[in-house]
Image (spheres, helix red, strand yellow):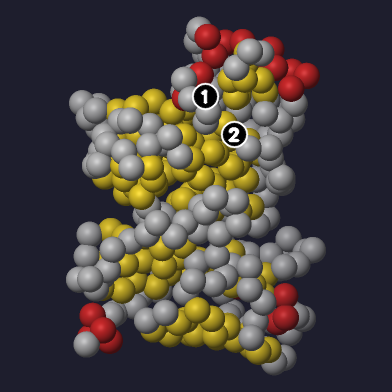
Amino acid sequence: MMASLWCRALLFSLLLAASSVHADMKLDCKPGMVSLVWTEGRSRVDTSKFRLGNCPPTATSAREATFTVELHDCNFMAMVTGSQLVYSNALTYLSDSKSHTFIQPVVCVFERPKEYHPILYDPIFASSGSSNLVFHMALMNEDFSGPAESNLFALGSFIPIMARVDQITHQPLLLLMEECVATTTPQLKADSPSYHIIDNKGCLSDSKRSRSRFQPREVPSEMLLSLQAFRFALGEEVFIHCKLVAWDPEGLDTTKKACNFVHGHGWQLLDNPAFSNLCDCCESSCKTRWTRSTRSGKRGITQNAVLGPLTITEE
């Protein structure tokens, strides 16, 4: 019965390095399991250096890297869109040589089973251009060690949110959450009721009225947000829309920052409290400096993401 519901699997492929055009990939998507065989046409490639997400090959030969893994492993990300259930990941090659390094998107698309109810709505957004960046946003468990087991949160409890950018060939970048707003719709609409969480170019405005906070950063390419569950749209499905920015870590200013409000002390810069004056504009307006905007493509890239549905309850 279940097998009949999982009726199709598709592979979306985009080779981002010319050196990979002589390779072949075979993908077999099954309920809960993925089998991938990468056959390499180049002679001086170490097949043990391929990775599917964060997983090494389960078997290798001189020209092949084979992966047989479960869909809840290897950093696969799940997304529900209408009648489809989508699992996304990336095949990468770990190399010190830029001519050999690449990222290959791997996507399995299934028909959504009627009885399937998602734990979280977790899309992956791949940037365009030459930067080779892949953005992720997900609901996490209490200590951020894995995906959330439920999308129900009691009023006043914490909603752990992880945002990350994978940078395969790019110079090291700092991930920032520039704006986040909660709505009751998966599409952000100007006339929809909303609750502002982060605004003013990286100011966690919700931290002024709650215990919400950015957690100390462990790696530059990742942000952890402990969001205190709010009263907005109690009992309804809520979607959190965010603008993520991958930015030059040497280019922080009043428009590219992450600021917490510390009660009794004021605004504090997450990445270097000594320069918390960059957060002073959180009380007024942090204006965009167009000459250094991410739209120029010179110092960073922006990407819109949506997380949900999640539900906040009074109990």
Please give the name of the residue rendered at 49% of the width and 85% of the height, measured from the top-left corner: 35
Residue tagged 1: 207
206 lies above or below 287: below
Classify residue 254 by image quadrant.
Answer: top right
Q: Amino acid at mark 1?
A: Ser
Q: Is residue 257 left or right of residue 106?
A: right
- First-in-chain label (2 vs 1): 1
Q: Which mark is residue 8?
A: none
Please give the name of the residue rendered at 73% of the width and 60% of the height, measured from the top-left corner: 98
Please give the name of the residue rendered at 60% of the width and 51% of the height, measured from the top-left corner: 143
Q: Which mark is residue 214?
A: 2
Where residue 72 appears, as percent x and y from the top left, is: 49, 71
230 lies above or below 85: above
Q: Is residue 100 left or right of residue 112?
A: right
Classify residue 216 by image quadrant.
Answer: top right
Classify residue 263 by image quadrant.
Answer: top right
| Residue 69 visible somewhere in the drawing | yes
**In front of the other: 231 or 282:** 231
228 lies above or below 310: above
**In front of the other: 226 or 306:** 226
Secondary structure, mark 1, is helix
Please give the name of the residue rendered at 58% of the width and 42% of the height, measured from the top-left corner: 224
The number of discs equals 2
Secondary structure, mark 2, is strand
Where residue 219 appears, as percent x and y from the top left, is: 71, 46
Q: Is residue 306 left or right of residue 68?
A: left
**In front of the other: 272 or 124:** 272
Q: Alpha-carbon neighbours of circle 1 within 10 Å: few (<14), some, or many (≥20)?
A: many
Q: Amino acid at mark 2?
A: Phe
